[in-house]
Amino acid sequence: MKALLDRARSFRRRVDFESDEYRKLAVGQFPEALFITCSDSRVIPALITGARPGEIFELRNAGNIVPPHDAYGAASGEAATIEYALEVLGVQDIVVCGHSHCGAMGALKYRADLSGLPRVDAWLDYARPALAPVLSDGGGADGPATGVSAVSDDPALREVVQLNIRNQLAVLREYPVARQQLDAGRLRLHGWYYEIDTGTIHELDEDGGFEVHGS
Ligand code: ZN
């Protein structure tokens, strides 16, 4: 933590806050996209996209899950963030980005014992039912998972992560505020699968497959 703290304390000296770019930030934020991704520390949206401060509005949680808009009444951090992004910030693009080696998806895929992590277990219930067709049958020992936080790059896990991306986009489409913007042609949804060890982005195509574009 010391290195992080030292860098935080020197941040204001390492950045030119008198520059036009930073002075504009005091006027307001005008992000181009809402980026929904996993809390995983290896996924850094600004690094991947080259975004500058003010360009990306982020929503992060374990497994890049979008709970149903009415999942837990009025108090939903996810619903509030999505509503704010669309209604106040006027964001016209939403990216749901899953990633390789995902501990949350690995826990589902390999049916990890989550008895010691009841909150994680309950949270993953938002993603679990729709993934049932691609989850393992065994009791946690049939896959390469070595724990909830360390999962190898199993091709079968990729299938789960990519299906989860499609599923979360489907939930997002059911948000009244998103539905309204989609119907009006003012909102585009994007699915990305990010490989943390190669930096490759696989983009969801209209046919439901994931493709690598560009070089
Ligand atoms: Zn993850």
Image: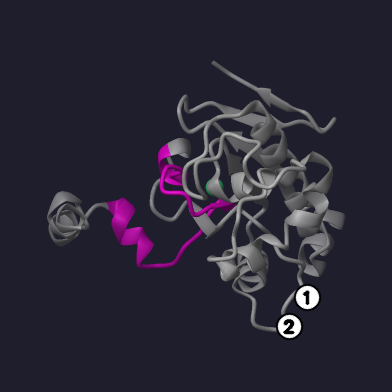
Residue 84 position in % (x across, y down): 61, 70
Q: For residue 141, which numbered disc appears in the image? A: none
Residue in the picture at 69% in, 24% down: 211
**Badge 2: residue crowd in 10 Å (few <14, some 14–19, many ≥20):** few
- Residue 73: image tag: 2
**Can see residue 34?**
no
Q: Distance between the residues labelled 2 and 1?
A: 5 Å
Direction from residue 7 to residue 164 in the image, left or right = right
Q: In this view, does 65 lie to the left or right of 182?
A: left
Name the foreground residue: 21 vs 103.
Answer: 103
Q: What element carries label 2?
A: loop
The residue most toward the bottom is: 74
Q: On the rendered image, what quadrant is the C terminus found in?
A: top right
Nearest the eye: 37 or 30: 37
Counting from the top left corner in percent of width and height, residue 153 is at: 55, 30
Residue 71: % across, % down:
75, 74
Label disc, if present, on residue 70 of the rendered structure: 1
Amino acid type, callout 2: Gly
- Asked if labels 1 and 2 touch by Cβ distance under 8 angstroms, the answer is yes
- Residue 46 in sight: yes
